[in-house]
Image (spheres, rainbow, N blue to C red):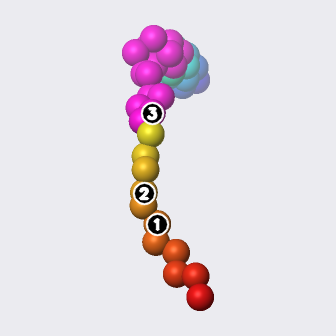
Amino acid sequence: MRYIFRFFLMLAILAAITVIGFAYVGDLSPQRSPVETPITLEVH
């Protein structure tokens, strides 16, 4: 039982470190740039 508790404790610590690391390093905001697409309309 002690090993299961230790495993879950280490897993929680690893998850916390991962979330903190992602918060500092993981800037996943997209690059914004204007997009222009010509459209031809056929009007009768």
| Secondary structure of residue under mark 2 | loop
| Cα distance between the residues tagged 2 and 3 | 16 Å
Q: Position of residue 18 (x, y in %)?
A: 45, 19
Q: Which residue is identified by label 2?
A: 37
Which quadrant of the rendered structure holds the N terminus? top right
Q: Quadrant of residue 12?
A: top right
Give the residue drawn at x 43%, y 50%: 36
| Cα distance between the residues tagged 3 and 1 | 22 Å
Q: Are marks 2 and 3 in contact (CB under 8 Å)?
A: no
In front: mark 3 or mark 1?
A: 1
Indicate whether residue 9 is drawn in magenta: no
Give the residue drawn at x 59%, y 88%: 44
Indicate whether residue 23 is drawn in magenta: yes
The answer to whether 6 appears left or right of 26 in the picture is right
Dot label at residue 39? 1
Give the magenta part as a residue range: 16-33
What is the three-letter code of the residue carrying label 2? Answer: Thr
Q: Are marks 3 and 1 in contact (CB under 8 Å)?
A: no
**Of residues 34 and 31, which is closer to you in this image?**
34
Give the residue drawn at x 44%, y 39%: 34
Q: Is residue 4 above or below residue 32?
A: above
- Of the numbered discs 3 and 1, the one sitting upstream in the chain is 3
